[in-house]
Image (spheres, grey):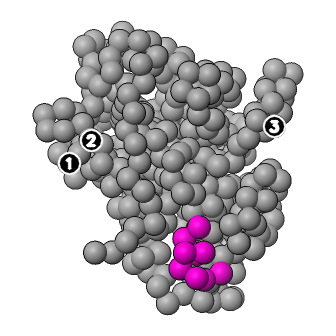
Amino acid sequence: MEKHFHLNTPLLESISMSKRVGTAVYLKMENAQPSGSFKIRGIGHFCQKLARQSAGLVCSSAGNAGMATAYVASKMGVAATIVVPSSSSQLVVQRLQDQGATVKTVGKVWDDANAEALRLAETEGLTYIPPFDHPLLWEGHAGMIAEVAASLGAGVKPGAVVVSVGGGGLLCGVVQGLKDVGWTDVPVIAMETVGADCFNAAVKAGRVVTLDDITSEAKCLGAKTVCEKAFEHSRSGDLTIISELVTDRQVLQAMETFLDEERVLVEMACGAALAAVYGGLIGRLQHGGQLPAVLGPLLVVVCGGSMIDTKQLAALKHKLQA
C-alpha cells in the first residue's frame, strides 16, 4: 500500500466549546500534521500522483501550502522553490528555509507570487503545485471526513461542519468528503475574515469575483479569487453551505481563547473557524433557522497553520488594538 505523507489526525472533544454551543464540539486537529496544516493531505496526494519523476517542485504560498510542498519535496528527495508575497513574515520565510526550500519573494499578494510560480514552472521545467485549485488536492483533503466518520463510529454524524475558507481548496475537500461518506444533509459553515472574503463576495454577487486587495491580517486566507469549484458547490444545492464573515478582532479573540482553553496556538486563517463558536455565531444561526434548534455534534476543522508564534501573536494584538 502507498505510504501517505499526512497523518490520521486526532478528533478531540472540546468540553469548554461544547458548553458554549450546547452540543458536543469535535475538533479535527489538522494542526498536528507534519507540515503544520491540512495542506499536506492534498499536496501529498497530488505529488504522489503527478510529481514522482519531477525535476523539482514550485509552489506559490502565503505559508502553509509552501510548508506542505517543502516537506513533501524533502521526503521525495527533490528540490522545492516556494514563491511568497512580500506580505509574508520573516517567520514564514525562515520556516520554509529550515524545511530545505528555496524561497523567492515576489509581489504584494498571493496572486502576484502565483504568476511567478507559473513562470518558473514553465521556464525551469518544475512541477507546479497548485495551493488550492485542483481535483487531486480536494481528493486528498476529503480523507479527513472519512477519518472523522471512522472516529465517530456508525450511526453518529455531525450536525454541521465549520471550516475556514481562503482559496476554497479545503471547502472543496470537505464537501467531497461529506459526499463520499453519504453525509450530504450536513451543512457546512464557511468562515472568512472581512477583507479576505473572496468566497462570500462571490456568493453575494452570484458569480466569481476578484477582490481589489486583501485587507485582513489573515494573510493565509488571502486569495483574491475563490476557486470556481467552491463557488459551484455554493450554487449546486446538493449540500448546504452557509457563508459567514468575522472581523480580524473576533478572530484574534478566538485564537487567544483557544490557546487558553485548549493549549493550542493556531494562526488567523484557522481562527476564523474557531470564531464561529467563540463569537456565538452557531447560536445565531440556530435562532435564525439556518441550523436546527437541536443540533447534532459540531465538527470544527482546526486547519492549523505553522505561520504563528507568540511574538507574531503579540504583534498582531498590538496592531489590531491600535
Q: Is residue 202 visible?
A: no
Q: Which residue is mark 2?
A: 151
Percent x, y for residue 318? 84, 26
Tell me the CA gap for discs 2 and 3: 35 Å
Query: In terms of depth relative to the viewer, which is nearer, 59 or 239?
Result: 59
Amino acid type, label 3? Lys
**Residue 97, numbered circle:** none
Q: For this view, does 299 lie left or right of residue 74?
A: left
Q: Amino acid at mark 1?
A: Val
Query: Which marked residue is nearer to the observer: mark 3 or mark 1?
Result: 3
Start and end of the magenta stretch? 71-79
- Relative to 116, residue 228 above or below: above
**Is residue 61 highlighted in magenta?**
no
Location of the N terminus by quadrant is bottom left
Q: Return the residue at label 1.
A: 181
Residue visible at 25% across and 13% down in the picture: 294
Q: Nearer the viewer, residue 304 or 222?
A: 304
Q: CA distance from mark 2 to mark 1?
A: 13 Å
Position above or below: 138 against 178: below
Residue under circle 3?
Answer: 311
